[in-house]
Image: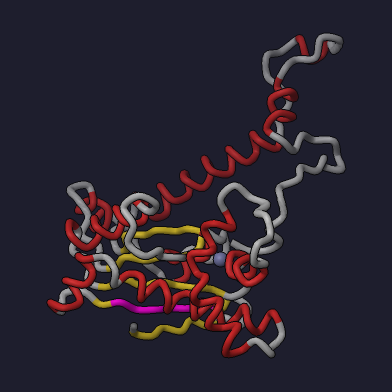
């Protein structure tokens, strides 16, 4: 998650092509006063069509250049998965862990969310995250859970920007990033005199540490740690300087 956490606003493209789903749908309808558009059933290409074509082309490339060339990798995966890693990473489009860490299909059971947060055990509020951790640890028997923060994280920026008592702008975002509230308070108390951006950088790692602590509230994680079958690791990917730090919980 990155950039300004403002409510989304659609802008019309300078060339008049549709920018919103509604505009794209409207563009596909044949014009009633255009004889040329009525002569064939193909609507003019839209930005939406191009975006879908990009996905189709991407898969075609993957199929011929990766899938078809690595049967030794993909054939065993048809029978099942046995990943060694569980990875928590931000949903930010710039930080895909499979790309940045060179993880192959089948290697990492992955959860991505805003600001790569792991909330503490709560069956009512966090069944999505909890079920992923439970399945990874109890069924897949992953050996290592890594939580990876990153530079210029918009979710972390949003967390640090939250004012006590101020109304939320989003339905979900603020409530979710408040998961990292204890880490925020720690950073403000220890580094409150630093510029905002520097505090964000520190919070990116401190929020990871809090997630690592929260992981220990899951009974199956606690058990794996006690038995020595599971390890927790923190990470931070800085895409500005091109660095990756990793540390043990
Ligand atoms: Zn992020």
* Quarter holding residue 15: top right
Q: Is residue 120 above or below residue 52?
A: below
**Residue drawn at (44%, 51%) of the image:** 62
User: Ligand 1 is found in which quarter of the picture?
Assistant: bottom right
Residue segment shown in magenta: 232-237
**224 to the left or right of 127:** left
**182 to the left or right of 193:** left
**61 to the left or right of 85:** right
**Residue drawn at (63%, 64%) of the image:** 2
At which x and y percent is residue 107? 29, 63
At which x and y percent is residue 7? 71, 49
Q: Nearer the viewer, residue 100 or 157?
A: 157
Q: Is residue 150 magenta?
A: no
Give the farthest residue toward the front: 165
Q: Nearer the viewer, residue 70 or 29?
A: 29
Q: Is residue 234 magenta?
A: yes
At which x and y percent is residue 240? 63, 78
Q: Is residue 199 above or below residue 95?
A: below
Q: Is residue 5 above or below residue 58?
A: below
Give the farthest residue toward the left: 227
* Quarter holding residue 45: top right
**133 to the left or right of 94:** left
Quadrant showing the C terminus: bottom left
**Residue drawn at (87%, 43%) of the image:** 14
Magenta stretch, overall SS: strand
At which x and y percent is residue 239? 58, 75
């Amino acid at each position: 998650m990155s950039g300004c956490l403002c409510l989304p606003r659609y802008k019309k493209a300078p060339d008049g092509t549709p920018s919103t789903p509604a505009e794209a749908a409207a563009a596909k309808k044949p014009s009633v006063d255009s004889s040329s558009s009525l002569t064939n059933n193909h609507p003019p290409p839209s930005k939406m069509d191009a975006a879908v074509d990009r996905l189709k082309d991407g898969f075609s490339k993957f199929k011929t250049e990766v899938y078809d060339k690595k049967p030794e990798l993909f054939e065993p995966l048809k029978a099942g998965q046995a990943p060694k890693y569980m990875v928590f990473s931000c949903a930010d489009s710039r930080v895909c862990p499979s790309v940045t860490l060179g993880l192959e299909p089948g290697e990492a059971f992955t959860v991505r969310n805003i600001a790569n947060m792991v909330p503490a055990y709560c069956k009512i509020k966090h069944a999505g995250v909890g079920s992923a951790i439970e399945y990874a640890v109890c069924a897949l028997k992953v050996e290592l859970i890594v939580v990876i923060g990153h530079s210029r994280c918009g979710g972390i920026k949003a967390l640090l920007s939250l004012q006590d008592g101020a109304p939320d702008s989003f339905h979900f975002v603020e409530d979710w990033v408040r998961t990292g509230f204890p880490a925020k308070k720690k950073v403000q108390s220890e580094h409150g005199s630093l510029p905002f951006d520097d505090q964000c950088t520190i919070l990116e790692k401190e929020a990871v540490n809090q997630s690592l602590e929260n992981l220990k509230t899951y009974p199956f994680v606690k058990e794996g740690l006690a038995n020595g079958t599971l390890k927790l690791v923190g990470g931070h990917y800085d895409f500005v300087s091109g660095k990756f730090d990793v540390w043990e919980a």
